[in-house]
Image (cartoon, rainbow, N blue to C red):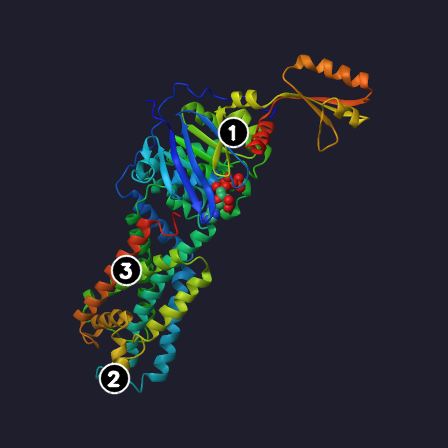
Amino acid sequence: MTMPAIRVRAVTKNYGALTALAGVDLEIEQGEFFGLLGPNGAGKTTLISALAGLVRPDSGVLEIMGHDVVSDYREARRNLGVVPQELVFDPFFSVRELLRIQSGYFGIRNNDDWIDEVLARLDLSHKAGANMRTLSGGMKRRVLVAQALVHRPPVIVLDEPTAGVDVELRQGLWQFVRELNRDGHTIVLTTHYLEEAETLCGRIAMLKAGKLVALDTTDNLLRRFATHSLRVNVEHTEVALALGGRANDDGWVEFDFDSYTEVEAVLARLREAGAGLREMALGEPDLERVFVELMHRV
Amino acid sequence: MSETQVHRPPSTAAVRRIQPMAADAPLTGFRTLLHKEVLRFFKVGFQTVGAPVLNALLFLLIFSHVLDRHVTVYGDVAYTRFLVPGLVMMAVLQNAFANSSSSLIQSKITGNIIFVLLPPLSYRAFYAAYVLAATLRGLFVGTGVLLVSMPFVEQSIANPLWVLVFALMGGGIMGSFGVIAGIWADKFDQLAAFQNFLIMPLTMLSGVFYSIRSLPQLWQDVSYFNPFFFMIDGFRYGFFGQSDASPWLSLGVVSACFVCLAALTLAMLARGYKLRS
Ligand SMILES: Nc1ncnc2c1ncn2[C@@H]1O[C@H](COP(=O)(O)OP(=O)(O)OP(=O)(O)O)[C@@H](O)[C@H]1O
Ligand SMILES: [Mg+2]
């Protein structure tokens, strides 16, 4: 029962001279809500495609729920649902037709109950009869989510599912994905909205140039890398910088510290030096800072 | 994200084991893909069936008007009667090719090919569905051509079984060929080149419009290297009980072509050539 939902071992993939995956090792447990982060071109989609059998790795092993994605591809694919990054659709069919067809590919003929439920939960019921061509971008993306779920896969991978989806729907989508996770589905998510990842994911991996540069629980990552900060807007920036502050792009000066008890001391020193405080703000540790720090450091 | 409270499930929570839905009937994947491929051309039947039938009808009207009174073939077969099976088979071949090749290249270019690559469909099911759908489209158009020719030509079919066997073989060959071309081509231009520089010349020179016995000896010999000649000649034998080559020879050549192309296509699909990079 301790079999991981996803197991990736020493996976490499090169496109000519370009290394998309440079030996990735990763295990994701059943029931996790996992974030796969990294800048553009880091290899996130390549890794997901390798899991889905769309890309053949040059070396290494990938398993879904214990099934090798090459030698036992049928079981591996039955256990996996992938929401692709690209907004692709088949213009010949209506939403319901498409979902029935997709169910059929997974061997399921009578799937209307589950299709109706998925449509309702994605707020698409009213568009069930509409042709794909007539849907807005955000609706098409929700259909992609529905297509990934037709066979109720234990492992669900979402490759930037919220790109181009409005705020309200994004909230709705996350609500749905959380419910799926609560029901026991393993969720793997890539996103460039780091706040989303921070809120949703229990554990996070960061990829950079095809290598894992961090793999830890979200809490540990925040604790390990991020500090609290005080941001001030002052009349004499050079004075604040002389006190150990860091210049920000927007002209503010930022001080890092480990605990809020240090805030008072910093403010006192600024006053004594005559920096001329105009505005101030406190910064919580957040994933964005962890991300930026990691990407620059490694 | 102020609207949602922090969720973060513990990573080691005891989880309920979710089972994927079970397949509820055998061969459902294959049948669904076949059904989808057939729907794809039916939904635009005006283009995919209507247009080629009209095309063939025009050929028939023009050629028969010009040649019918002057030419007979195999002794007493009027030219128009001779022409019809060639046009029917040409329609079968061209449309079978067009179906699988255009479906695949469209799916590749729009990216929706992933919907058939993500599910647990075997490459054999994939092959069978695309080629069978292509064959069906070919048979539909071929039947359409035969039907519209009926007001103009009195036709009798000497041996329907030969007709059917060659139509199926031709559809299978060109459907496979279309799968290969659709997977290989990256752009519509490349597919058009395939069609214009290979398939069109080979069909036109295969004896659709003439009996090769009317050709000089050299060109008769050359025709024997054109597999399309055997497809059309064998098909025509089914109509008239006469043909340029022995129907058994034609059947042998055509079967060998089909087996080779099927093996080649299956090998490509098994390797994931250009589909699973
Ligand atoms: N089919 C391909 N041929 C050549 N290079 C490719 C191919 N697919 C991906 N790459 C390259 O591999 C690298 C990783 O790409 P990938 O799509 O996995 O990045 P990503 O992390 O998903 O980025 P993004 O956040 O932009 O989606 C990139 O440099 C990309 O250009
Ligand atoms: Mg990507």
Q: From the viewer's perspective, tell me whether residue A124 is left or right of residue B126.
A: right
Could you tell me which chain the residue with mark 3 belongs to?
B
Compared to A201, does A20 lie above or below?
below
For label 3, the SS is: helix
Compared to A190, does B213 lie above or below?
below
Q: In which quarter of the image is the C terminus of chain A?
A: top right
Compared to A142, does B221 lie above or below?
below
Mark 1 belongs to which amino acid?
Trp
Q: Tell me, for residue B73, which label it has, or none.
A: none
Residue B172 picture location, percent across and down: 28, 60
Q: Tell me, for residue A174, which label it has, or none.
A: 1
Residue occupied by mark 2:
B217
Residue A88 picture location, percent across and down: 48, 46
Instruction: Give the CA distance from mark 2 to mark 1.
Output: 75 Å
Q: Tell me, for residue B261, which label it has, or none.
A: 3
Q: Are labels 2 and 1 on one chain?
A: no
Label 3 or label 1, whichever lies nearer to me, is: 3
Compared to A279, does A145 lie above or below?
below
Label 2 or label 1, whichever lies nearer to me, is: 2
Pick the front one: B215 or A218: A218
Precedes in sequence: disc 2 or disc 3 = 2
Could you tell me which chain the residue with mark 1 belongs to?
A
